[in-house]
Amino acid sequence: FSELKQNDPEIAQVLLDEVERLRGGLQLIASENFASPAVIAALGSTLTNKYAEGYPGRRYYGGCEVVDRAERLAIDRAKALFGAAHANVQPHSGASANLAAYAALLRPGDTVLAMALSHGGHLTHGSKVNFSGRWFDVVAYGVRRDTETIDYDEVRELAVRHQPKLIICGATAYPRLIDYAVFRGVADEVGAWLLVDAAHTIGLVAGGAVPSPVPYADVVTFTTHKALRGPRGGGILCTAELASKIDRAVFPFVQGGPLMHAVAAKAVAFGEASRPEFRAYAEQVIANARALTDALAAEGMRPVSGGTDTHLALIDLRDLGVTGATAERSCAAAGITLNRNAIPYDPEPPTVTSGIRLGTPCVTTQGMGVAEMKEIGSMVARAVRDPGAITSVAERVTQLTRGHPVYPRG
Ligand code: PLP
């Protein structure tokens, strides 16, 4: 770091300021985490220099014998961790992993059945502003109005009516477990592939805290930087039958040279996630999310679907007469980072929304538990309800984060 400081003080200052930002506030973005110093060391390594188009033992560049070892370790660890027949660890991100999965399974114009963005699905599941909605004929399912959980009857009806070639489940803002067996049954009934986008939950799967989609899906795509706590990046698991299709879709179809420093960092993260401490972490993430959800509910902040089974809560703010955008701003002013989020059947536009999404991966990595979640729930409620309380909430945020330092000095 001293070399960076000398060579480029402006960027060095950005790095320092970001660590201070993380240390000084509560990070409740459900898709974020704090990667370990070991993961960050691998990311900041000389492996960034190496061109390694292709796969271990089958590269289009010389000098890959060392980086091959990193990728083999990442692949073997991912396969063992998730019990998958095949793993591709090269996708640069979750969106690239999904693009590659589509490329492996579909032709432009094919029909896809996926969860609506407005009900918790991801941009890459058929939004018109994304390749998925532009290049494929996407039919969307959603959640029921009464239970706010996936309408499995609608999924089946739409599948039978539209005969999709691919069915996708997995979401960005869905607090409940997904019944993969039902999706598998529907996919089999209509002869569709089943893709589970486990970007959000793969860390909980790694820790054995939620059921794995691997036994049910033809393809599982994921990100490595959310609850899994690895470097920013993506990955794909699939059946042996689809292995070479998936590999050819990632390279050379979607990507060029893999980011070998990120591949090495993914190997580190898979290694960390296979340890018993990570199992305890994953359980705690969910226990914390439940405690936070209950605390928010006790403050009159309604959890969509009535609760959570995962790492996140989706809160309907309409009873408080506050929009998601306003709540996000009030919390930010108090040092609490979270995001506004559409709730199912949201009357507000996506830039405003009626909801907020909160996740516990970061605060759990910091060592916080149920007692802290109860307090954070009441702090969020105070900040959202009463602008006059923001200063005192901010003071308490500072005290709380001091007791649970992120990346402790030294
Ligand atoms: N899929 C889902 C369900 C996601 O929630 C996300 C990101 O939040 C992605 C894919 C895309 O991941 P990335 O931002 O790494 O492209």
Image (cartoon, rainbow, N blue to C red):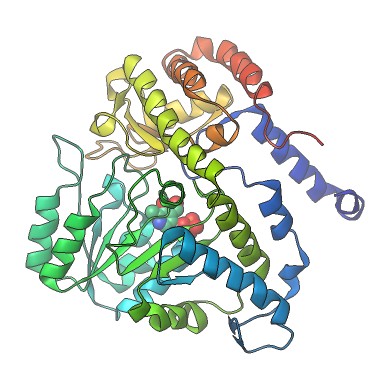
Q: How many marks?
A: 0
Quadrant of ligand 1: it is bottom left
The residue positioned 42% from the left and 49% from the top of the image is 200
Tell me the quarter of the picture where residue 347 sits. top left
The foreground one among 55 and 391 is: 55
Q: Is residue 183 visible?
A: yes
Q: Is residue 136 left or right of residue 352?
A: left
Residue at far front of view:
276
The residue positioned 43% from the left and 52% from the top of the image is 202
In the picture, the quarter occupied by the C terminus is top right
The residue positioned 66% from the left and 74% from the top of the image is 69
Image coords of residue 248 (percent x, y):
45, 83
Image coords of residue 226 (percent x, y):
50, 48
Q: Is residue 89 visible?
A: no
The foreground one among 178 and 25 is: 178
Q: Is residue 227 above or below residue 160?
A: above
Image coords of residue 201 (percent x, y):
40, 49
Q: Is residue 377 left or right of residue 191?
A: right
The residue positioned 34% from the left and 54% from the top of the image is 212
Q: Is residue 178 above or below residue 95?
A: above
Residue at far right of view:
6
Image coords of residue 236 (percent x, y):
44, 67
Q: Is residue 1 above or below residue 164?
A: above
The foreground one among 22 and 324 is: 22
Q: Is residue 46 left or right of residue 242?
A: right
Q: Is residue 393 above or below residue 333?
A: above
Q: Is residue 64 left or right of residue 194?
A: right
The foreground one among 104 and 321 is: 104
